[in-house]
Every structure is written in structure tokens, then in C-alpha cells.
Image (cartoon, helix red, strand yellow):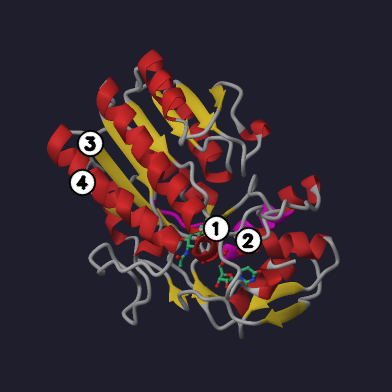
Amino acid sequence: MSRVLVTGGAGFIGSHVADALLQRGHPVTVLDDLSGGDRDNVPAAASFVHGSVVDAPLVDRLCAEHKFDTIVHLAAYAAEGLSHFIKRFNYTNNVIGSVTLLNAAINTGVRRFVFTSSIAVYGTHADLPLTEETPVHPEDSYGIAKHAVELELKACRDLFGLEYVVFRPHNVYGPRQNIGDPYRNVIGIFMNQILQGKPMTIFGDGAQSRAFSYIDDVAPVIAESVDGDAFLNDVFNLGADQPYTLNQLAAAVADAMGAAPNVVHLAPRSEVQHAYASHAKVRGVSGRRDETPLADGLSRMAAWVRRHGARTGARFEGIEILRNLPAAWRV
Ligand code: UD1
């Protein structure tokens, strides 16, 4: 049994990871500032602390009091496309927040730090799928921040002996996703638009591709890495193998929601066109093998979304650069 701190545990992926850790018998404390997450997502059996990973006195105090064995760090501002336009905010949350946790981890004897990076670290590659051997050259502030933390973890391992595990998930979807967030998670955006009788908005021609990963194929693997040594001091892509274009996705989401495939094409966003990854490496160490087919995952998420209804997410206050901001994000 490991005393685990889950940052971002009121969020979508984090709350599922907290559930999976509790199922494995670990006591869990959740730290979350509720900026994107929801208090109701936190499992009843976990203790909850409302606060930010950027708040160094709070993080130091929490780690000193609880003497965590493991930190599973998921708290982040994860709107990759928007990150170009909120650089200070992005690096404060995603780099300084992570380093604040690392300081406390080293000073209070945490043994293992599990970090959710992203396939955003790879940038554009003609040779797909991306493997862990693919060179990293992130193209946006979010990916750069994630990679900086990956490098920092390696340095902490070498100097302080802090064990690390890095996961690079991608395009995760499922129940508890914040479908009101207008800046990210296209499946939630499409479902929310359908509930409101609006067309699904596709950036560009819709030929860009991603592999959409169902939460139940992702969260249990992150939780598994807290136990044993199989994942130690290594980096793993995590998620679904099968890529789909955005046009294919829109048709599949409409189908799952029982709606007409009503789409509108917007000007393209600055982004990697094709991004999907190989998961041979993680399959080599994880006991989990199955991949939820897209239609099944979408229908489970659609059932949850219908129960919870449409959401109106808050617009981001304090965009730092307006130049070249996609028009859809200006309103
Ligand atoms: C990125 C990362 C992913 C990470 C996620 C975190 C890559 C390749 N992916 O996802 O690892 O988990 O950030 O948030 O680095 N789209 C539309 N219409 C919309 C919204 C989005 O067409 O209204 C399209 C985008 O242009 C994009 C795709 O949907 O091609 C996915 O977008 P999004 O859900 O924002 O995630 P990524 O930027 O791919």
C-alpha cells in the first residue's frame, strides 16, 4: 500500500485514476483547484484538499503532513491549442506547478513521481505511429511545458534518486469529461453542440487525424504504475491505436448521440495534422490489453452526457496574445 497524492483528482482523468488507485487498496488524497474539475468527481473514499499546485506553502505543508509515498501528477491546464496564446499561464501551471511538487517530493521523501505528459511532446512527424523512440520537438507551449517536466524528472532521478514514470496519453474521452470547455476535447465539444442543437464545428477540412482513447483504457494503467517496478524510470505512450479523421469522428459522434451529422467547417487551427501513437511498449509491461472500440466508448459517453445535459463553460479570462487567436475563441 502506498500513500498517494493525486493532483487534478477532481478532473476527468484524475478522478478515474483516483478511483483505480482506491480499488487497488491505496489511500488517496486529492489536491485540485477546481478550475476545470468538479468536487463531485472526487471519489468519496479519497480525502480532498482544495488548492493549487502553484501554491508552494500549501504543497509543502501537505507533503510534510501526509508523508506521501507517491505523487500522481495530473493537474494541468491542458488546452493545447490555446496554450500559444496564454504562455505565462501555461508555464506557471504546467511547469512551475510541477516543479513546486517536485521540490516538496524531494524534501519530504516521496519515492515515486508519476507524471502525465502528452503526445504533444512529439510535434509533427511523417513517420507514424509515434513511438517512444520518435524524437521530440513540441510545437506549442503546452507540449514544451510537458517536455520540460519530463527532462526535470530525469534530472531529479539522477541527483536525488526520485523514481519516475512518464505517460504520454492522447485525446482521452469518456464520462466526467468537462463538455462545457470550449477550448479542448473535441468529443465533449461535439456532444455539447449536439445537445444544444448546434452544428459540430470542425477546424479546417477535417482530414486531420487523432486516436481517441477511452478513459477505461487509460486510467487503470496509470494506477497500475504505482505498484511494482515494471514501469520505473521510463516513458510510455498511452491510449488507443486506431486513428480517425475529424470527419469520421463527427459522423461517429452523431451516430452515438442519435443525431444528424450536422457539421460546419471553421478556419484551420495551428496544430499537428496527424498524431497517433504505438502502444507496444506499455503493453509489454501492463496487464491490460484490450482497446475499447470507438463506437462503444462514444455510446457510453453519450449515455452519461444525456443524463447530465448540456453545459456552458466559462470563457478563458486573461488571454495574453490576441494575434492569430482562432475566431471561434474570440467570442
Ligand atoms: C492535444 C494532445 C493530446 C492531449 C490534449 C489535451 C496532440 C496531438 N494531442 O489534443 O495529447 O490529450 O491536447 O487537451 O498533441 N477540433 C475540431 N473542432 C473543435 C475542437 C477540436 O475540429 O471544435 C479538432 C482539432 O482541430 C484537433 C482535434 O479536434 O484536430 C482534437 O482537438 P482537441 O480535442 O483540442 O485535442 P488535441 O489538440 O488533439
Q: Residue 263 lies in what quarter of the image?
A: bottom right
Point out which mark residue 163 bears.
3
Q: Amino acid at mark 3?
A: Glu
Image quarter in which the N terminus is found: top left
Chain-order first, disc 4 or disc 2: 4
* Contact check, label 2 and label 1, Cβ < 8 Å: yes
Q: Of tags 4 and 3, which is closer to the observer?
A: 4
Q: Position of residue 105 (x, y in %)?
A: 31, 28
Residue 106 left/right relative to 56: left
Q: Label 2, on which residue?
A: 183
Q: Residues within 10 Å of mark 3 (few under 14, many from 20)?
A: many
Residue 281 left/right relative to 319: left
Q: How far apart are labels 2 and 1 at the CA level?
A: 6 Å
Q: Position of residue 181 (x, y in %)?
A: 67, 55
Looking at this view, is 302 or 112 the one in front? 112
Q: Residue 60 lies in what quarter of the image?
A: top left
Q: Main secondary structure of the magenta part?
A: helix
Residue at 30% x, 61% y is: 280
Q: In what element is the residue under mark 2?
A: loop
Q: Is residue 159 above or below residue 189?
A: above
